[in-house]
Image (cartoon, coloured by chain):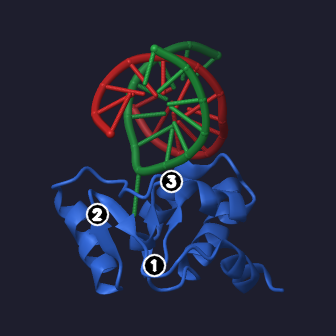
Chain colours: A blue, B green, C red
Amino acid sequence: MNAFQSKFDPLVHGIIANIPKGQVMSYGDIARKAGFPRHSRMVAKSMTRCSYELPWHRVIRSNFTLAFTPKTVIYNKQKQLLLAEGCSFTQGKVIPAVTPIAEDLDKLIWGP
DNA sequence: CCCTTGACTATCT
DNA sequence: GAGATAGCCAAGG
């Protein structure tokens, strides 16, 4: 565990863990909120490394598509998890069950 | 130290 | 709107 991860992981994990049910965030958004605007790739690595429970299925691409290749098992798994939360799918794109709440989430994490 | 590899993103054709 | 291009940055070989 290097210095970067020890700071980055908890932030990213905390943010993901606080994404409300039915809501989704992009890798870039999470990295930005963590204070590392260009570390979207690191967000992905942090999630892969994370062994404990985390709503990783709420993390998608900035264009609202899933990050995995369609038709793969893992892709379908994420899709199912999102559907179970009330989200819907249209032409491969995710439609959150809740309208974007960037500001609310911001307050939820960083306080008012 | 150089090169490749990503669960990325924005922009240009 | 799909594909290519260019930034991006840590990690591992």
Please state if A100 lies on the left or on the right of A74 as rendered: right
Give a yes or no on whether discs 2 and 3 share a subunit: yes
| Quarter holding residue A48 | bottom left
Circle 2: element type: strand
Query: Which residue shows up at 29% across the image and 85% down it?
Result: A84
Residue linked to disc 1:
A54
Q: Eyeballing the image, is C13 above or below A91?
A: above
Query: Which residue shows up at 43% across the image and 58% down it?
Result: A64
Query: Which residue shows up at 47% across the image and 86% down it?
Result: A21
- Nearer the observer, disc 2 or disc 3? 2
The quadrant the C terminus of chain A occupies is: bottom right
Evaluate if marks 2 and 1 touch, with contact meaning CB atoms under 8 Å apart: no
Chain for numbered disc 1: A
Please state if C8 lies on the left or on the right of B12 as rendered: right
Give a yes or no on whether discs 2 and 1 share a subunit: yes
Q: Eyeballing the image, is A41 above or below A66?
A: above
Residue linked to disc 3:
A62
Q: Residues within 10 Å of mark 3 (few under 14, many from 20)?
A: some
Mark 2 or 1 closer to N-term?
A: 1
Residue linked to disc 2:
A90
The quadrant the N terminus of chain A occupies is: bottom right
Q: Residues within 10 Å of mark 1 (few under 14, many from 20)?
A: some
Give, as a three-letter code, the residue at label 3: Ser
Evaluate if marks 2 and 3 touch, with contact meaning CB atoms under 8 Å apart: no
Residue A46: x and y in percent read 52, 61
Query: Which residue shows up at 37% across the image and 56% down it?
Result: A65
Give a yes or no on whether discs 3 and 1 share a subunit: yes
Give, as a three-letter code, the residue at label 1: Leu
- Nearer the observer, disc 3 or disc 1? 3
Residue B5: x and y in percent read 38, 34
